[in-house]
Image (cartoon, rainbow, N blue to C red):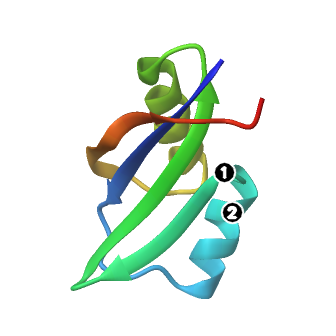
């Protein structure tokens, strides 16, 4: 499996500590940050394909109680994993 890098932009402008705890509970491969009233969750997710990585991340974020506004692809679209 490959590891894919991408960012989900959330539909909220601030992520509280409780929000972050919920997100990290669902997404142990994510980094959460807010800048200029835009909250993002960055992923380095292992999956068989980029599409599956993004779909599973959106589902995980949804289970934490958030909606995704859009997906941003980082460059390159995959990351290397220790082998």
**Residue annotated with mark 2:** 24
In the structure shown, which secondary structural element does the residue marked by tag 2 occupy? Answer: helix
- The x, y position of residue 51, in whole percent, is 41, 20
Q: For the residue carrying disc 1, how many other residues have a C-alpha within 10 Å: few (<14), some (14-19), or many (20+)? A: few
Name the residue at 35% across, 38% down: 76
The quarter in which the C terminus is drawn is: top right
On the picture, is 52 further left or further right than 75? right
Q: Where is residue 44 drawn, in percent x and y?
A: 56, 45
Frontmost residue, 47 versus 55: 47
Q: Mark 1 or mark 2, which has the lower sequence index?
A: 2
Q: In which quarter of the image is residue 64?
A: bottom right
Q: Residue furthest front?
A: 83
Label 2 crowd bin: few (<14), some (14–19), many (20+), radius 10 Å: some
In this view, 66 is above or below 79: below
In this picture, is 66 found above or below 75? below
**Residues at badges 1 and 2 in contact (C-beta under 8 Å)?**
no
Question: Could you tell me which residue is drawn at 53 percent across and 57 percent down?
Answer: 65
* Secondary element type, mark 1: loop
Residue 6 appears at what percent x and percent y?
40, 44
**Count of residue discs:** 2
Res 65 label = none
Out of 7 and 1, give the one closest to the viewer: 1
Q: Name the residue under label 1.
A: 29
Query: For this rendering, which residue is in front, 57 or 11?
Result: 57
What residue is rendered at 75% in x and 37% in y? 82
Question: How far apart are the alpha carbons under marks 1 and 2?
Answer: 8 Å
């Amino acid at each position: 499996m490959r590891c894919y890098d991408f960012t989900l932009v959330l539909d909220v402008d601030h992520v509280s500590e409780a929000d972050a705890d919920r997100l990290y509970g669902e997404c142990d491969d994510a980094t959460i940050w807010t800048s200029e009233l835009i909250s993002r969750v960055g992923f380095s997710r292992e999956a068989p394909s980029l599409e599956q990585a993004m779909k599973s991340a959106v589902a995980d974020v949804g289970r934490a109680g958030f909606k995704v506004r859009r997906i941003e692809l980082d460059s390159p679209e995959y990351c290397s994993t220790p082998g």
